[in-house]
Amino acid sequence: MTNLASLPLPGYTFPAAISSWSAAIKEDTDKWLEQDFSFLPEKMRLKYQLSNFGKISARCLPDMPTYAHLRVTGQFMLWGTIFDDFFEFKTVSELRYLHDRAMEILKGSDPDPSETPFFTILAGIRDSLVSLMPAYWIRRFIQNVSVWIASMQEEVPYKGVMHFPSLRYFMELREKTIGVQAYLDLIEMQLGGCLPDEIMYSDYMKELYRLAARVFAWCNDFYSLLKDIGREPLNLVLVLQHEYNLSLEEAHTRAMAIHDEDVQTICRMQQEVPDYGIYTDTVRAFAHYLGVMIQGQNQWYMKDTMRYKKDGHPEKDSFKTT
């Protein structure tokens, strides 16, 4: 038997920071769980309180210009995580409907009182973002939310069964299912101005987003390995183990090498920002804050959350009373 506690966890040289509103966002997050998510079983609301999602927003986005900016990012992080947990075992057709309706809500549709409360909460997040950010940023954000929710449909064949995808397909899928692209969009709130589409969709920025999604995913897979063994095949370590018939230790070592190479590439890209004219310094700042976000996630795993400890995460039947 492998001693999972002996397997190394990732580390980063990116700067660590935390918002001066850390206590406030934690307090608000606990309040949202009791009020907005009151339809969840009490045991699940407690688990989410122990997950401490307010702290991840405070660490990943530490330099927001106002508390309103940090507050909406905390709402989105909480909503997205619970949405993913709550609906992860639904059918493809159910997930397709949820995706399409979420897109309608984000684009301005009003939720119906008979619908799942997730849409009412999402409409509030939308309204807050629209009051803070320009329309072209909103369009980019909606597209990235779409990529993440749509990818839930691709996970269906692997949910609830230990059926492994190929390594190649898994690595492409994991970039989308981690859902970090829309979260990366929130970095622009810290820059004092939004970058135009021609820069955000440039090859440099698309590669930065892709690598960040991979690093977020691999980091998550290391911390969630204990809860994923025997339950969830969509973990880099477990897919490598299955693909190459490796021991868990060998698969972990190979996964860490993939992770470290991606991190090194991000570090190099931070030092080699292309010439974007008057936007070069803003892109450089974005790349810097991307590193802060990666470090922030890791600090949250290490210091703040119980989500990846024993019984700290939802199981398949956690929401059945709802």
Image: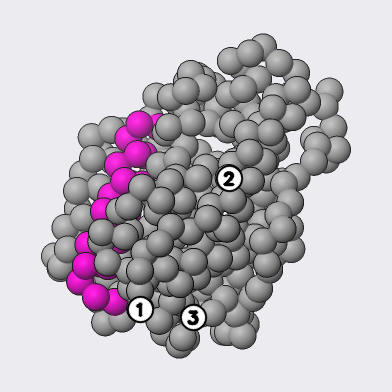
Main secondary structure found in the magenta portion: helix
User: Which mark, by number, is residue 64?
Assistant: 3
Q: Earlier in the sequence, mark 2 or mark 1?
A: 1
Which portion, as a residue range, is magenta?
133-155
Q: Earlier in the sequence, mark 3 or mark 1?
A: 3
Q: Quadrant of residue 153?
A: top left
Spatial CA span between label 2 and label 3: 27 Å
Circles 3 and 1, Cβ within 8 Å, touching? The answer is: no
Measured as percent of width and height from the top left, residue 284 is found at: 49, 66
Position of residue 304 relative to residue 260, above or below, is below
Spatial CA span between label 2 and label 1: 26 Å
- How would you rate the neighbour count of disc 3 (Cα within 10 Å): few for under 14, some for 14-19, many for 20 or more? many
Nearer the observer, 306 or 148: 148
Horizontal relation, residue 71 to residue 113: left or right: right
Residue under label 2 = 265
Amino acid type shown at disc 2: Thr
